[in-house]
Image: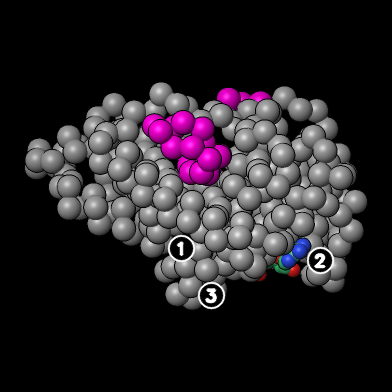
Amino acid sequence: MIENSKLTVIGAGAVGSSVAYAALIRGSARHVALYDINAEKTEAEVLDLAHGTLFTRGGDIIGGSDIAVAEGSHVVVITAGAKQKPGQTRIELAATNAKIVRSLMRQTLEVAPDAVFVIVTNPCDVLTMLAHEGSGLPAERVFSSGTVLDSSRLRWEIARRTNVASTSVHAQIVGEHGDTEFPLWSAVRINAVPILDWTGEDGTPMFTREQLDQIAVDVRDAAYKVIQGKGATNYAIGLSSARIVEAILGDENAVLNVSTVLSDFHGIDGVALSVPSIVNSSGAHPIYETPFDEQEIAKLRESAAALEKVAADLRD
Ligand code: NAD
């Protein structure tokens, strides 16, 4: 457990302010700082958040447009950058956001040299690869929120269909946080029951393979639907990011599907992909023993190839 823990959230837009809000309400860190180049917006967000701290768990909030606010942070969550417009893919944001994240990593490391970095800005896996290469930090100290959010969406989908609490649905989305992501169906259980064995009231299996495939598509495309309706996704990513921050600051060894640059994970090297990982105060550590069946390995390789290509274009 880190005492007097400090979280800095970079980017005070829809996502960044929701991360700060969730972290304050949940008491994820003792001190929260918010940084953005837009001074007026940041000061307004900080004031609004500060006015509610009487009703939170005792953390405090500061912020502004000087990176010095991040000084001494234990965790830095990066949310700054361009976001998807309706219909736009995450990958289409890559070039703009790569420049922003590279420069932010440099500035932040000067004031918070020991921080663990969590990248939320999209495309978060590719940006994690570039941030890892550019900073020289060990892979465990710069990772992305990856498919923690997507896994929560999957657990919610299964929970509402089966009428079982989502905390008792054990299910992971792995791979890219984006169009090539997929559920690790071979490992999905409701408590101890494999998903294909779960029966409805009539005693017959509740799900067919086709229905599971449709759930995977719904989860993959969930963000497009939310962005179409309200222009951004913010609450669920705010909560998932706060959960990741707690696992780091609390040195929890919690297993979360974050995205780290992998070395020889089922033969995949040098690409950031989400797989079940142990998260603690030193960062994120992929669980190399996680079993994948043959089809799942093939899909993970597809994810890796897609991201490798985008990262290579950005390095040129
Ligand atoms: P937004 O436009 O509301 O906010 C972005 C903020 O970044 C703005 O306030 C802007 O001033 C700031 N910014 C831009 N360049 C900066 C710089 N160089 N330094 C400091 N601040 C800078 O966007 P949003 O809705 O908050 O989304 C932010 C990012 O998060 C997007 O890339 C989006 O795609 C991503 N996102 C990721 C996930 C995920 O699961 N990984 C989920 C939702 C959104």
The quadrant of the rendering that contains the C terminus is bottom right
In the image, which is nearer the foreground, mark 3 or mark 1? 3
| Residue range highlighted in magenta | 251-274
Label 3, label 1: how far apart the Cα atoms are: 11 Å
Q: Amino acid at mark 2?
A: Ile
Residue with the mark numbered 3: 85
Q: Is residue 108 above or below residue 99?
A: above
| Residue at 67% in and 48% down | 131
Say whether residue 216 is visible.
yes
Residue 261 drawn in magenta: yes
**Depicted 279 relative to depicted 173: above or below:** above
Graded by Cα atoms within 10 Å as few (under 14), some (14 to 19) or many (20 or more), the crowding at tag 2 reads: some
Question: What separation in Å lies between label 3 and label 2 (alpha carbons)?
Answer: 21 Å
Whether residue 245 sits left or right of residue 168 in the image: it is: right
Tell me where residue 17 sits by quadrant: bottom right
Q: Is residue 114 magenta?
A: no
Residue 37: mark: 2
Three-letter amino acid code at the position of disc 1: Ala
Pointer 3 or 2: first along the chain: 2
Q: Is mark 3 within 8 Å of ligand 1?
A: no
Number of the front mark, 1 or 2 = 2
Q: Do the numbered discs 3 and 1 sit on residues whose CB atoms are within 8 Å?
A: no
Q: Label 3 amino acid?
A: Lys
Dot 3: within a 10 Å radius of its alpha carbon, few (fewer than 14), some, or many (20 or more) residues?
some
Nearer to the camera, 190 or 124: 124
Disc 2, SS: loop
Q: Residue at x 62, y 35 (%)?
A: 139
Q: Looking at the picture, how far across and down is residue 14, in whole percent?
A: 65, 65
Quarter, ligand 1 = bottom right
Q: Residue at x 76, y 27 (%)?
A: 2
Q: Residue beneath label 1, please?
A: 223
Q: Is residue 77 left or right of residue 256?
A: right
